[in-house]
Image (cartoon, rainbow, N blue to C red):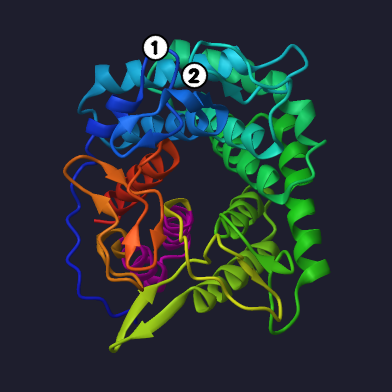
Amino acid sequence: MHNYKFKIKRNLPSLKTILALTNNIGIVQHTRYKTPDLRHGYCLDDNGRALVFTTRYLNYTNKNREMILKLSNTYLSYINVCQKPNGWMHNFISFDNHFLENTGSEDSFGRAIWGLGECAANSKDESQRQLATDILLNSLNNITKLESPRAVAYSLLGLNAYYSSCKQAHIIKYIEFGHNLLLHKFNHNSTNKWPWFENILAYSNALLPLALFMSAKNLDIPSSEKVALKSFDWLLTQTEVMQDGKSIPSPIGNRGWYRKNGLKATLDQQPIDVALTVMAAGHFFRATKNKIYQDAANLWFTWFLGNNIENVKVANLDDGYSYDGLQSKSTNQNHGAESVIAFLLAQLEICKLK
């Protein structure tokens, strides 16, 4: 049983900051303190994640419906603009509305597929569902060209959401591709003491078991479900510590990460890692009814509230933002789109666990 002293307020996420970061192009990538920093423009990753949030928000509550639908339309429009005729995506757009590269990263593509899949499956607006479906289907053939396990895993989140809604048989082969890639990674790299997909714990770690589990469910492969849960359980043992008799979430730090047989980095912990752990634990709780995962989701959310190795409050519940990272005795005082959306997604997940 996890022990933590923080009382969680399961309030509906505040939209104040996400509204401040969003303009007619999309959600601004970075801030300087609370002010949008337009010098860095916009990115596909953040607009994909933002589309996930707005879609999930209206599937949880009908409050702020028109406002949320307008935000969703902006994020979906950004993805639409970024898609190339061959289905690949641009990533970055400058503050003066120009593409900054020919083709974006695999990870940004995967995050866009996540947003598209959830929107196509669950948007409360029919035109948004139709457009998200069109963009998603035009991208499908590129999914089998992905090599990054996280790009594949993000794509699987979107594909599994879409398939669960539409049950279109042709989607299965893309889910099979992603499932097989992740399972191969696990079988190739795991040992009894290191049951993991890679020889490193890097970023967005909880994403990998979550994507494998969702795919195994849709493919009806119980053995892969067990692998997913085993790897997630082990991840929790590597990213929780005990201080003063209570459990502390401690995601792998971005300053060096954690290579097998190496040193575990603790500095520059990122909100996105915490949020994905909350979302994965919440999903596993609903799927298995095992209260251990409900406790894990609640525990990991308290990282934002100050239950972390630095005893520093990372998020602002009233305004709806998280700072950009946990550092030694302090936080990164900026709160860019990734951190804001991560916190909002985590808070929404906690609301579902009432």
Horizontally, residue 194 falls left or right of residue 51, namely: right
Which residue does the image show at 61% across and 65% down from the upper left?
A: 256
Compared to 297, does 45 lie above or below?
above
Picture coordinates of residue 206, whole percent (x, y): 55, 59
Q: CA distance from mark 1 to mark 2?
A: 12 Å
Q: Residues within 10 Å of mark 2 (few under 14, many from 20)?
A: many
Disc 1 marks a residue whose amino acid type is Asn
Q: Is residue 297 visible?
A: yes
Residue beneath label 2, please?
76
Give the quadrant of the C terminus: bottom left
Q: Secondary structure at mark 2?
A: helix
Q: What is the span of residues highlighted in magenta in the rendered image? A: 273-301
What is the number of the mark on residue 24? 1
Q: Does the magenta-highlighted stretch encompass residue 284? A: yes
Which residue does the image show at 73% across and 65% down from the upper left?
A: 198
Horizontally, residue 124 falls left or right of residue 170, namely: left
Q: Secondary structure at mark 1?
A: loop
Disc 2 marks a residue whose amino acid type is Leu
